[in-house]
Image (tube, rainbow, N blue to C red):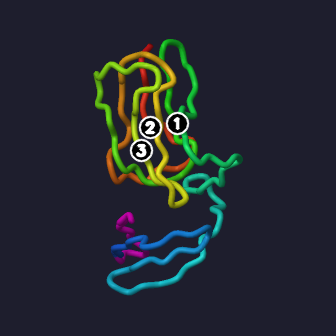
């Protein structure tokens, strides 16, 4: 899935998340596999994975917000980016495909809700995303 490097008490560890299901994960640390249970962080600087408040089986639009003439496209669920169909500067129309990501073992398509130009792209293929993470900005 995703590789990370951590330094703990001066020691460097290469870590790969092999499988993630709920709060249980199978990880590999420096070649050794471990089953671990994730805990909700107690400090603000740590990453927490939010559970979705609604079930989304075929995402046609996107979870976004408007700031002036900029439409911000956000991730409705945590997952992994599988394919990005646009790049910065591309003109998009309503219902154009923006990207596909995997969440909860399902492929989810995000389409444009607005006509505009891709102002900034915040993700690439294989990136791991969390719920409400900004994926891109569309200038209207």
Q: Position of residue 136 (x, y in %)?
A: 42, 32
Disc 3 crowd rating (10 Å Cα; few below 14, some 14-19, many 20+) is: some
Q: Position of residue 39 (x, y in %)?
A: 64, 69
Identify the image quadrant of the N terminus: bottom left
Q: Position of residue 27 (x, y in %)?
A: 44, 77
Q: Which residues are magenta?
A: 1-11
| Front: mark 3 or 1 | 3
The Cα atoms of the two marked residues, 3 and 2, are separated by 11 Å
Element under label 3? strand
Badge 3 is on which residue? 100
Q: Quadrant of residue 15?
A: bottom left
Instruction: Give the mark nearer the N terminus: 3 vs 2.
Output: 3
Rendered position, 20 above or below 110:
below
Asked if the stretch drawn in magenta spans residue 8, the answer is yes
Element under label 2? strand
Instruction: Give the mark nearer the N terminus: 2 vs 1.
Output: 1
Disc 2 crowd rating (10 Å Cα; few below 14, some 14-19, many 20+) is: many
Q: Nearer the viewer, residue 8 or 134?
A: 134
Q: Nearer the viewer, residue 112 or 32?
A: 112
Element under label 1? strand
Instruction: Give the mark nearer the N terminus: 3 vs 1.
Output: 1
| Front: mark 3 or 2 | 3
Relative horizontal placement of residue 36, taking residue 8 as reference (left or right): right
Rendered position, 33 above or below 115:
below
Identify the image quadrant of the C terminus: top left
Asked if the stretch drawn in magenta spans residue 115, the answer is no
Badge 1 is on which residue? 74
Asked if the residues shown at circle 2 and circle 1 are in contact, with their CB atoms under 8 angstroms apart, the answer is yes
The majority secondary structure of the magenta stretch comes to: strand
Badge 2 is on which residue? 135
Residue at (40% x, 39% y) in the render:
99
């Amino acid at each position: 899935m995703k590789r990370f490097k951590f330094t703990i008490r001066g020691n460097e560890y290469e870590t790969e998340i092999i499988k993630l299901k709920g709060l249980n994960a199978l990880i590999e640390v420096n070649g050794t596999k471990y089953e671990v249970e994730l805990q909700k962080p107690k400090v603000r600087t740590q990453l927490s994975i939010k559970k979705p408040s609604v079930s989304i089986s075929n995402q046609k639009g996107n979870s976004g917000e408007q700031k002036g003439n900029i439409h911000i496209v956000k991730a409705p669920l945590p997952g992994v980016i599988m394919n990005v169909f646009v790049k910065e500067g591309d003109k998009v129309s309503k219902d154009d495909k923006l990207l596909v990501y995997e969440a909860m073992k399902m492929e989810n398509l995000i389409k444009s809700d607005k006509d505009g130009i891709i102002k900034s792209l915040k993700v690439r293929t294989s990136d791991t995303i969390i719920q409400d993470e900004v994926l891109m900005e569309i200038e209207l």
